[in-house]
Image (spheres, helix red, strand yellow):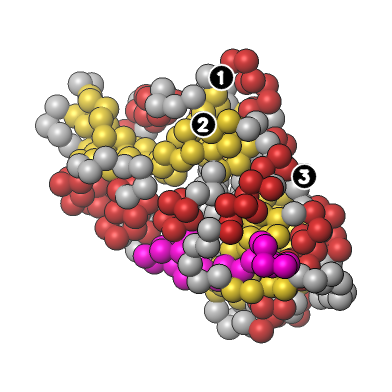
Amino acid sequence: MDIDIRYVKKNEVKKLVAFNKAQYRPGHILTNKRYLDWQFGSLNALRSEYTVLGVFDAKENLLGTFGFTFLDFLCFGKKVTATSCANLMVNSSLRNMGLGYALLRKAQELHRITLDHGLNADALRLFLGMGWSGGDLNRHAFIVNSAGIKKIIKKQGALIQDSTAVPVNPNGLELVALKKYDVRLEALFKKTKSKYPITVARSKKYLNWRYFKHPLITYSVFVATKNGKFESFVVVRMEGSKQLKAGRIVDFISTDSAEAFSFAGVVDFCRIQGAHFIDYYFSGNFHVRGLARARFVDCSSGSFVLLPKFLNPVVVTEYNAINMVVCTTMRTISKKIRNINNWYTTKGGGDQDRAY
C-alpha cells in the first residue's frame, strides 16, 4: 500500500472530524472541532498544522491518526521537550496491516522522550512490544456517600464505607481559590522542584492552556497560602450527576507540610458540591503520607477498585485504573526515565481528563 505519514493540516479539519466520526462512538469528544483546536492546534503547534500525524493513501484519504501534544518536562533538573500522546486510531477495516506500528514509530522520532496515558489492551500490547515501559497510576479516594455509590454500581455488599474526616492543624495555612495565574506559583514550583524527579513544567503558558483558560472545562483551582506565599497548588474538577458525582483532583503540587491540609480542604469543597467521592490518580510514591493523614484510602484492592472512572455515563467495571507508558532515546539516564516511580503525572497530565 502506497502511504504517506505527515501532519494533518488545519484546513483538513473536516477530513479529520469525518475520520473520527467513523471510528469513534457517536458524540465522542474527538469529533468536536473546538476540542481539536485546543488539544492539537494551540499549545506548541504550528500555525497551519495540528499536532496529529495522519496516514494518507495516494488519493489523500485519511487511514489513521495519532494525536499528541509537545510539552516541556523537568527531568532530573533539566528541561526536556517530550511528546505526550493522546489517541492512536486506524481505520477499522485496515487494522493488523502495520499502520498503527508505523504511526508509533514516527511519533517516537519526534523527541527524546515519548509518553502516553490510558491505553486500551490492544494499544498496550503494541507499545510494550515495541520496548516501552509502563504501569498503572496509583488511585486514592475519600468516600463521602458510600450508600449512594453502592446503589449506582449495584453492589450493596461491597466493602465501601464512608471515610471519616479528621481535622488537620492548619498551622497558619489557608486554602483559597485562584481564578487566574499568579506569579507566586513560580516560587512554589521552584521550591518543590527536587521533590518530583520527572514532571511536566507548569509554566504560565502551560497552566493557562491546561486549566485557567480551558475552552470546554471549568476547573476549581486552589492554593494553600502562608504568610503571603503559596505552599500548594490543587486543581479540582467536578464530574457526574446527582446520582453519582465525583470530585477529581487532576493536579496537585505541594510542600510536605501543606499536603494533608490541602487534601482535607479539597474534601470540604467537594462535599459541599455534593460529591459521593473524591479521587486522585498519580504516579510515583508522592503525597502518600498527606493522603493518609487526610483519610484517603488506596483504591488498588478490595471493593474500592469498583469506584467508577467514567461518570458520563457511569461505566461499572472492575478495572478503573489509568496506565502510563514511556520510551526514551536518552541512553545515559534511560533506566531512570523508564522507572515509572520517578515520574509524577496525574489524571490531568495526559488526555484522560477530557471534556465529554
Q: Residue at x 67, y 62 (%)?
A: 229
Which mark is first along the chain, 1 or 2? 2
Report the Cα–Cα distance between label 1 and label 3: 24 Å
150 left or right, relative to 83: right
Residue 181 is situated, as x and y percent measured from the top left of the image, at 49, 62
Q: Is residue 33 magenta?
A: no
Residue 174 is situated, as x and y percent measured from the top left of the image, at 72, 73
Cβ atoms at labels 2 and 3 below 8 Å apart: no
Residue that label 3 marks: 285
- Is label 1 in a helix, a strand or a loop? loop
Disc marking residue 330: 1
Q: Residue at x 75, y 77 (%)?
A: 144
Judge whether residue 61 can be spotted in this image.
Answer: yes
Report the Cα–Cα distance between label 2 and label 1: 10 Å
Residue most toward the left?
Answer: 59
Disc marking residue 26: none
- Is label 2 in a helix, a strand or a loop? strand
Q: Quadrant of residue 77?
A: top right
Residue that label 2 marks: 80
Cβ atoms at labels 2 and 1 below 8 Å apart: yes
